[in-house]
Amino acid sequence: MQDRNHLSDVQATNSVSLIENGLVEIPMLQLLDENGHETNKEQSPEINETTAKRISTTMQYIRLLDERMVGAQRQGRISFYLACTGEEASTVGSAAALSENDMIMSQYREQGALAYRGYTTDQFMNQMFSNQLDPNKGRQMPIHYGDKKLNFMTISSPLGTQISQAAGYAYGQKMAGEPAVTICYFGEGAASEGDFHAGVNMAAVLNCPVIFFCRNNGYAISTPSEEQFKGDGIASRGIGYGVKTIRVDGNDVLAVYAATKKAREIALAENCPVLIEAMTYRLAAHSTSDDPSGYRSKSEEDKWRAKDPIERFNKWLDGKGWFDKKATDAFLEKSRAEILAALKKAEKVPVAPIEDIVEDVYDTPPWHLKEQLVELKAHIAKYPEHYPKTSGRLK
């Protein structure tokens, strides 16, 4: 029987030994330098032209979507938005390395992964405007997407809740014998939540085929990483929990793609979790409620703009003979028009009936919710000037 305390495997010493941070250096996988040149062609993953171009166009589309929706929030057309500017390679590159049957559990900056799966511009807009075509029926904040057909779990606002859920979902995949994994995205700030430690430990002990994908973008809202933790990033925590770990340049699409491919292969073959720490940077504000000029310098941002993941990957595509500037410009023009048209259409769609608040939460709405609905309708009728004419679509 195995020694439960593993004492038989521990090397003894007769002197006090301290293991200090920094004794073990965790390397960062990088396959493209900042000019888009391959650093080691022998290690570059196999990727065909179709997939490479799809990755590129998805990243460019998401950047356009982010720019337009931040503008829409500033105009008061939507209430809130989170852009992923500068982090596109981490989410799109990793999503491209997955199977369509793999479950994606997102935090809130992974719209690129959803777009790569096939989420349409109209779907994005309906969710952000919380109209009656929104599958969440207006119950979620903007950017809290979810799509069952695309195996994209609905986003929750509280940080870290998806981490333990991902461990459990992946355990279910294993028990069902499914040839699929779960990928769970989160930021380095969310790794300070208790759910991170519970979820990663659970996955390690129960051998769950889950990829924990941390976007270490340098800031938890306004708190820089050096004020969040003292250890060597998030990768060191994976090692501490006995989880196979990869650190990758999060602005290098090729490296992210290769790392996620390898992580998926290991998770499936060995029924075990893998942690990926993508070192990237959030060029945008944390959200439209944030002003980053209060906690970081323009020179710092400019330093990272020089590492732009889209430009970097397009230079690599150009070197392969796969980049067509004329076609790219046409795509960008078409996407801008499509996004603007979808925005104008979605904001004209009425909101969901107010009865939806209670009628499909329970099979039979309980008495107290029925009473609250009556009170809510009376309140709106009494103060109509404070609510949009479409508010509630009262029956």
Image (cartoon, rainbow, N blue to C red):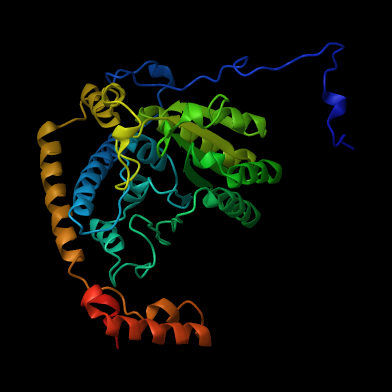
Residue 68, percent from left and from top: 19, 48
Residue 32, percent from left and from top: 35, 21
Give whichever of 299, 310 is nearer the camera: 299
Q: Quadrant for residue 36, please give it.
A: top left
Residue placed at 41% from the left, 77% from the top? 357
* 66 up-or-down from 77: above or below: above
In the shown orientation, is residue 204 left or right of residue 80? right
Residue placed at 14% from the left, 54% from the top? 340
> Which quarter of the figure is the N terminus placed in?
top right
Residue placed at 40% from the left, 16% from the top? 40
Residue 98 shows up from this direction: yes
Q: Quadrant for residue 270, please give it.
A: top right
Residue 48 shows up from this direction: no
> Which quarter of the figure is the C terminus placed in?
bottom left
Residue 116, percent from left and from top: 33, 47
Give whichever of 252, 254 is nearer the camera: 252
Residue placed at 69% from the left, 46% from the top? 206
Residue at far right of view:
1
In the shown orientation, is residue 366 left or right of residue 130? right
Residue at far top of view:
15
Give whichever of 219, 201 is nearer the camera: 219
